[in-house]
Image (cartoon, rainbow, N blue to C red):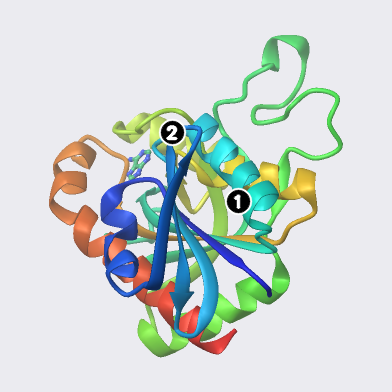
Amino acid sequence: YGTIGIIGAMQEEIELLLAQLDDRFTEQHAGIVYHRGTFQGRKVVLTRSGVGKVNSAVCTQILIDRYGADAIIFTGVAGAVDPRLNIGDIVISTSSLQHDVDVTALGFPRGTIPYQEVSEYAADPSLIALAEEAGKKVYPERCFTGKVLSGDQFIADRTVVKGLYEELGGACTEMEGASVAQACFMNGVPHVIIRSMSDKADGSAHVNFAEFTIEAANRSFAIVKEMISQV
Ligand code: ADE
């Protein structure tokens, strides 16, 4: 890869990487901050997209157009959807979709964008393999692969999260991955999403999120760091 784009939504999700970015040059586009530099000897652009699908989609397009990113890695935290996952566990995306797209009234299945070839975006097999290798080194036992469900909603309800699992079969839920994936798909750029669980998207999610976000964000970063060192 020439330039690898690395996106986190919040400051906590880019903080450690930012501190380790060499030859840093920072600028803003569309109100989003981009840090160009080298990390583990690799050319990267690190950015904090802001929260939500629109922010992360605009951020991704700019990474591709202005910085020539030819691979994109998302790093951050998520709420666990699969009941087998615990706080701190890692999910490497195999695919992602937007769970809040709802045109069911017109007969389209939940999560399906009408008149589009695909609504569930596959992550890149090479990047998945790289992430899995990193996972085996950094957190053997606690790394999983699965479908990431994204929406402009912080999920904090046991019934809602159960519905996500049963209807869409997701591993975790967050607010940016699938929009990054869609923007990557539209541009033919490979991507993968790495998420560590900060909460279980249930009635305790807001409390757990506050307590575990920094630790989970740093666990996700540890995977990304190992990936970049092997790429
Ligand atoms: N990010 C971390 N936890 C989340 C949750 N429960 N819902 C949406 N995004 C999240």
Disc 1 secondary structure class:
helix
Q: In which quadrant of the rendered view does residue 138 lie? A: bottom left
Q: Residue at x 70, y 76 (%)?
A: 126
The mark nearer the N terminus, 2 or 1, is 2
Label 2 near ligand 1 (CB < 8 Å): no
Rendered-image quadrant of the N terminus: bottom right
Q: Residue at x 36, y 81 (%)?
A: 139
Residue nearest the observer in this picture, 205 or 224: 224
Question: On the rendered structure, is 80 left or right of 148?
Answer: left
Label 1 near ligand 1 (CB < 8 Å): no
Residue nearest the observer in this picture, 80 or 67: 67
- Badge number at residue 63: 1
Question: On the rendered structure, is 228 left or right of 181?
Answer: left
Rendered-image quadrant of the C terminus: bottom right
Q: Residue at x 64, y 72 (%)?
A: 127
Q: Is residue 169 above or below residue 158?
A: below
Q: Position of residue 9 (x, y in %)?
A: 39, 46
Spatial CA span between label 2 and label 1: 13 Å
Image quadrant of ligand 1? top left
- Which residue in the structure is indicated by mark 2? 31
Q: Residues within 10 Å of mark 1 (few under 14, many from 20)?
A: many
- Badge number at residue 101: none
